[in-house]
């Protein structure tokens, strides 16, 4: 066997193998690799897009939470103001009621005082008339007169006390 012939045969076999690989195996392999690269690129782009959407959603959630907290604080402040108004109105109503009750009680006291004075005047006038009758029925004697006046004064003191 000739070494040159062997080298030529191996070179031809190698060339045929290269041609077979380049024409039959390499194109589908490159297509598969390119398809895989495309899918990876699309996945990375989708991940970036999802990351941006997530960041936007988080910002929106933060804004919504901030707005909700502000609204809640506003509602709480409004409730506090309303509670203070109710308390102030209740205080004012209580003061008016107290003033009305005080005036009614004062009027009752004055009426009771007036009735007591009128009753006392009637009693004093009755005692005075009774004393005058006793004086007029007896003979006019200084000692008897003094005793009757003392008795009348005692009765007046007892009635007043």
Image (cartoon, helix red, strand yellow):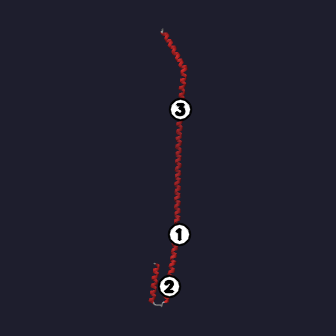
Earlier sequence position, callout 3 versus callout 2: 3
Q: Say what secondary structure mark 2 lies in.
A: helix
Label 1, secondary structure: give it. helix
For the residues labelled 1 and 2, the Cα–Cα distance comes to 38 Å
From the image, which quarter does the C terminus lie in?
Answer: bottom left
* Above/below status of 133 relative to 112: below
Discs 3, 2 touching: Cβ within 8 Å: no
Which one is earlier in the sequence, the residue at label 1 or at label 3? Answer: 3
> Residue 112, image x and y in percent?
51, 74
For image coordinates 45% across by 84% down, the residue present is 151
Residue under numbered circle 3: 43
Disc ID at residue 37: none
Query: Counting other residues with Cα less than 10 Å from the Cα at mark 2, is it few (<14), some (14-19), or many (20 or more)?
Result: few
Q: Position of residue 25 (x, y in %)?
A: 54, 21
What residue is disc 1 on?
104
- Structural crowding at the residue carrying mark 3, measured as other residues with C-alpha within 10 Å and reported as few (<14), some (14–19) or many (≥20): few
Residue found farthest to the top: 1
- Per the image, label 3 sits on a secondary structure element best described as helix
Q: Which residue corresponds to the image point at 55% horizontal and 20% vertical from the top-left?
A: 24
**Which residue is pictured at 53% across the width and 58% down the height?**
86
Judge by depth and name the residue closer to the eye, 125 or 70. Answer: 125
Which residue is identified by label 2?
A: 130
Gap in angstroms between the C-alphas marked 1 and 3: 88 Å
- Looking at the picture, does residue 6 appear above or below residue 88? above
Q: Residue at x 50, y 87 (%)?
A: 133
Where residue 21 sits in the image (x, y, percent)?
53, 19
Within 10 Å of disc 1 (Cα), the crowding (few <14, some 14-19, many 20+) is: few
Mark 1 or mark 2, whichever is nearer to me: 2
Mark 3–mark 2 Cα distance, whole angstroms, equals: 126 Å
């Amino acid at each position: 066997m000739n070494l040159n012939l062997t080298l030529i045969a191996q070179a031809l076999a190698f060339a045929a193998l290269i041609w077979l690989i380049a024409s039959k195996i390499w194109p589908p392999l490159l297509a598969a690799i390119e398809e895989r690269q495309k899918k990876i690129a699309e996945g990375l782009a989708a991940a970036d897009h999802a990351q941006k959407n997530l960041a936007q959603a988080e910002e929106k959630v933060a804004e919504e939470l901030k707005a909700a907290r502000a609204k809640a604080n506003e509602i709480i402040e409004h409730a506090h103001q309303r509670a203070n108004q109710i308390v102030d109105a209740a205080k004012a109503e209580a003061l008016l009621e107290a003033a009305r009750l005080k005036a009614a009680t004062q009027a009752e006291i004055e009426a009771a005082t007036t009735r007591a004075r009128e009753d006392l005047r009637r009693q004093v006038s009755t005692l005075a008339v009774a004393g005058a009758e006793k004086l007029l029925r007896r003979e006019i004697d200084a000692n008897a007169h003094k005793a009757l006046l003392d008795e009348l004064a005692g009765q007046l003191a007892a009635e007043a006390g």
